Amino acid sequence: MAIGNGEDKYSFYSSRQARPPHRSRLPNYIIVPAVGLAGTLIYGYWYFLDEAPFTKRRRLLATVCFTSLPQILFFLVVRASFIRNISYLNHLFISYYYSSSPPNLRSIQGINNMLHFFNNTVMKYFHLTIEPP
Amino acid sequence: MTVRRVGSRLASAAEKFIQEQGALNQKTVYKASSPYTYTVVRSNMANAFVLPNNHVFVLTGLFKCVKDEDELAAVLGHEIAHNLARHAGERLSGSFLTNILARFILILDPTGLLYSIFIPAATLLHDLPHSREHEMEADHIGMHLAAEACYDPRAAARVFSAMKHANHDDEDGDSWSSRIAMSKTSPPEFISTHPSYDTRISNFEEWMPEALVKFNADNGVKCRMIREEMKLARQRAALDASRRESLREVTATKPLSPSELKPPPSFEAW
């Protein structure tokens, strides 16, 4: 058995095989966010796909209705992010107010009181003010 | 008063509609809607609109085209249908998606050239077709609501042809101003938020048999009785209105008595 003459390619002493060239031209830091964004958009579209009443038309309906305390807390976070000028989250806030199915709350006054309390305690620390509706 | 009376009948039909559709569609949760408010706005424009949370507005110019309660029900049914189908929410959802894509385009092309092409394209290819679709859907549901509330569904085609003719009457004449008015009142359908009157009228004719089945349910007995009640309600409303008018005239013409002219007791009287 000849050693080191290149005839046996599995030999420990043979020269290393050249790596195949890297096929993808785009780096991973571009591909991963792009795929993530596309995936999120597709999943979001599928998740919020709805059926119109009577005509049964398929449509995108991503407005939210708040019926419980965790959802209201989520709304407050969204509202705070709106004030911090993250404006794409502001759509969720607007859709809350302008949805045709209103939240199952007894009165807007309750929200006002909550907001005043929240402004004077937590948000004061962050130098932010949540406007009452 | 008439708007409120017709609207309240349609609102009860809308409640029934919500219950029916809620039973059919398990995924979407239809909640009991807020009470409707009706506001009549003094204006020459023949228009009506609805705001989310069930606030219906009717412009007085509409009464040039609307001759009876059936025709008013067709218009109000259309406006109520917009809220039932949650078109405002759908529009917001669509604009949310468009906004994300627009931002992504701005990241790709910071010069804003692609963005300046994307925004009108999105309006023309996404927003306006969806808006016209919403209008047609509201026409369909509104017609169903009117028939459910025992208003004649054939009135929908009548009122829209009256609006079409009112527009054409405005367009008569050879002056430049009337031509400009014509171009303002009837843009081509593909750049309009609403379908053309002809499209809407032909749609009404297509949907009419279905609506008439609902209107003539129980061999028309149910609706005949309700329409008799409507007639009585109209007479009562007319009587109330004439009584109010006569009372107003009396109070306007009646001279004030000396006791009414006497100034109120002031501090000096004590």
Image (tube, rainbow, N blue to C red):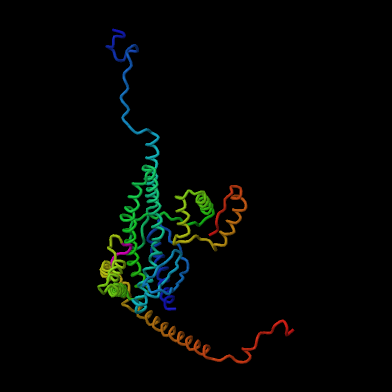
Q: Quadrant of residue A106?
A: bottom right
The residue at the far right in this view is B270
Please report the residue visible at 40 percent of the width from the left and 60 percent of the height from the top.
Answer: B88
* Viewer-closest of B235 and B210: B235
User: On the picture, is A24 further left or further right than B29?
Assistant: left
* Residue B17 highlighted magenta (yes or no): no
Q: Position of residue B235 (x, y in %)?
A: 41, 85
The answer to whether residue B90 is above or below residue B250 is above
Q: Position of residue B142 (x, y in %)?
A: 35, 69
Please report the residue visible at 47 percent of the width from the left and 52 percent of the height from the top.
Answer: A90
The answer to whether residue B182 is above or below residue B264 is above
Q: Which range is magenta? A: B192-196
* Viewer-closest of A83 and B200: A83
Q: Quadrant of the C terminus of chain B?
A: bottom right
The answer to whether residue B123 is above or below residue B82 is above
Q: Position of residue B165 (x, y in %)?
A: 28, 74
Please report the residue visible at 37 percent of the width from the left and 51 percent of the height from the top.
Answer: B98
Q: Quadrant of the N terminus of chain B?
A: bottom left
* Viewer-closest of A114 and B263: B263
Q: Position of residue A78 (x, y in %)?
A: 50, 51
